[in-house]
Image (tube, rainbow, N blue to C red):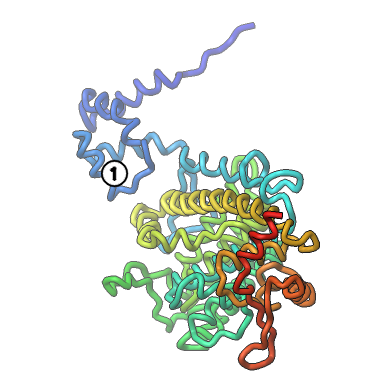
């Protein structure tokens, strides 16, 4: 059988490229650039960083930039039907950094990772453990997402509010309660495709009772609304979204992108799509206020909708807030480099990777906590795990006040079950109960000598 050779190999192609580029710079320059290529491509850097690296390597930054972009071109694709305000395409490059991070997330969801969700193995194998961690995650996410937007207080104060179930009394508390309600709602929308009415409902839930102008809740911005993104450190406008008259058409394209099944050669990894949706809601800025909160909620909705259940146990907004300057910078890098979404996707995936590392750390601590809780069986064999967890918490936080409502909200049980748990601890003479200041609710606290009682029973 006769075999026909390919017209060229990669090795011979490099020689053809050097000949084509020779008019732009000498062949010796090409050799030098090629030798520095691994260092130039060590990271997917924006121009603001790349130019300094090129100079340190003794290269002309503009020439080196063109050279590197030539090698990245085969990995680049346009993200249809999304487009920039001027009508040009957004693009993304499938970098090794993105692939490595996605592999870690896929293992965590599908098996093999330390946070595997398989019911027969892993630290999250027990349904009660998953329920507790899910509640904690949604509370933390609601708190941190609100703190990003200017809610006052600390995360502990925010989660205490949500556990107590009391009515918010300040604008910041209302924002936190709204965020928590919205995070609960998106889990009920996992079978619902994205459409403009869903975005409106979500923004309403997130902003109602928190806006200076109440009419801005539940409506898209119009031509008379002057909306821009401002750097609060300098009061400088850093981004003006596309004209409001384009919004209906642009939101239609956004929903089409979200709902389309990208398969085969069009495949886009669901976590990458979730990150792009996050970016696009910030870019389109469809509302007068609440765009950031809506974008972060949609990210969660899309990831959960496509089976990435690990996100139910990973708050990400605390990682965003911890290095907040990178958040608007990722938008700027994308915009300033012709709609290159790679910069925002890399940023978002790095945030997810940090959140996953925090989850691993938390699970190690949870493992130690559950070991302590097992030892508490000696305190009373009739105590269930929830009661033993309450004892463990009270040992570490002896002044905490518990109510049936706070225990119900933290553990995901019914009100009668929560009350029975606490009254059981009173019966065991480990907690005492009193009426609240208003006399409407029982308040439970650990006895003063709880530690001595526990240690005495454990020595038996």
Q: Which image quarter is the C terminus in?
A: bottom right
Q: Mark 1 points at which residue?
A: 50
Residue shown at 55%/12% (left/top)? 4
Number of numbered markers: 1
x, y percentage for residue 43?
37, 40
Query: Could one spot residue 249 in this view of the protein?
Result: no
Q: Quadrant of residue 149?
A: bottom left
Categorize mark 1 by other alpha carbons within 10 Å: few (<14), some (14-19), many (20+). some
Tell me the residue at 61%/91% (across/down).
437
> Hey, which residue is sitting farthest top in the picture?
1
Question: Relative to the observer, which residue lies in front, 347 or 377?
Answer: 377
Residue 61 sits in quarter: top left
Q: In which quarter of the image is the N terminus?
A: top right
Picture layout, residue 235 above or below residue 339: below
Residue extending farthest to the bottom is 438
Measuring from the top left, give residue 168's x and y in whole percent: 56, 84
């Amino acid at each position: 059988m006769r075999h026909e050779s390919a017209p060229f190999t990669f090795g011979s192609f490099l020689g053809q490229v050097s000949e084509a580029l020779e008019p732009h710079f000498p062949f010796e320059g090409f050799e030098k650039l090629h030798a520095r290529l691994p260092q130039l491509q060590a990271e997917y850097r924006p121009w603001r960083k790349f130019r300094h690296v090129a100079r340190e390597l003794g290269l002309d930054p503009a020439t080196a930039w063109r050279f590197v972009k030539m090698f990245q071109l085969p990995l680049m694709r346009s993200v249809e039907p999304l487009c920039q305000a001027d009508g040009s395409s957004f693009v993304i490059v499938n970098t090794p950094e993105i692939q490595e991070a996605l592999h870690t997330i896929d293992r965590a969801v599908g098996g093999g990772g330390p946070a595997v969700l398989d019911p027969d193995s892993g630290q999250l194998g027990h349904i009660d453990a998953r329920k507790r961690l899910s509640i904690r995650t949604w509370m933390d996410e609601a708190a941190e997402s609100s703190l990003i937007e200017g809610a006052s207080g600390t995360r502990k104060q925010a989660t205490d509010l949500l556990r107590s179930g009391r009515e918010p009394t300040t604008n910041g508390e209302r924002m936190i309660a709204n965020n928590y309600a919205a995070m609960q709602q998106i889990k009920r929308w996992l079978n619902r495709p994205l459409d403009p009415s869903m975005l409106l409902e979500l923004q309403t839930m997130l902003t109602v009772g928190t806006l200076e102008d109440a009419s801005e809740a539940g409506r898209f911005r119009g031509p008379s609304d002057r909306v821009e993104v401002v750097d609060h450190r300098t009061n400088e406008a850093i981004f003006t979204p596309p004209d409001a008259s384009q919004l209906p058409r642009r939101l239609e394209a956004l929903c089409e992108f979200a709902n389309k099944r990208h398969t085969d050669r069009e495949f886009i990894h669901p976590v990458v799509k979730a990150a792009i949706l996050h970016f696009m809601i910030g870019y389109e800025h469809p509302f007068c206020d609440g765009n950031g909160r809506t974008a972060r909620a949609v990210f969660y909705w899309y990831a959960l909708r496509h089976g990435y259940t690990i996100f139910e146990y990973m708050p990400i907004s605390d990682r965003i807030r911890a290095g907040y300057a990178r958040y608007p910078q990722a938008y700027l890098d994308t915009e300033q480099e012709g709609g290159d979404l790679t910069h925002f996707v890399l940023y978002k995936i790095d945030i997810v990777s940090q959140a996953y590392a925090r989850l691993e750390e938390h699970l190690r601590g949870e493992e130690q906590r559950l070991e302590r809780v097992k030892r508490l069986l000696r305190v009373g064999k009739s105590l269930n795990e929830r009661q033993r967890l309450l004892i463990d918490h009270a040992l570490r936080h002896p002044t905490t006040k518990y109510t049936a409502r706070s225990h119900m909200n933290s553990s995901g049980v019914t009100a009668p079950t929560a009350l029975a748990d606490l009254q059981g601890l009173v019966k065991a003479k480990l907690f005492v109960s009193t009426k609240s200041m208003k006399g409407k609710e029982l308040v439970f606290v650990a006895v003063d000598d709880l530690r001595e009682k526990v240690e005495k029973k454990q020595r038996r």
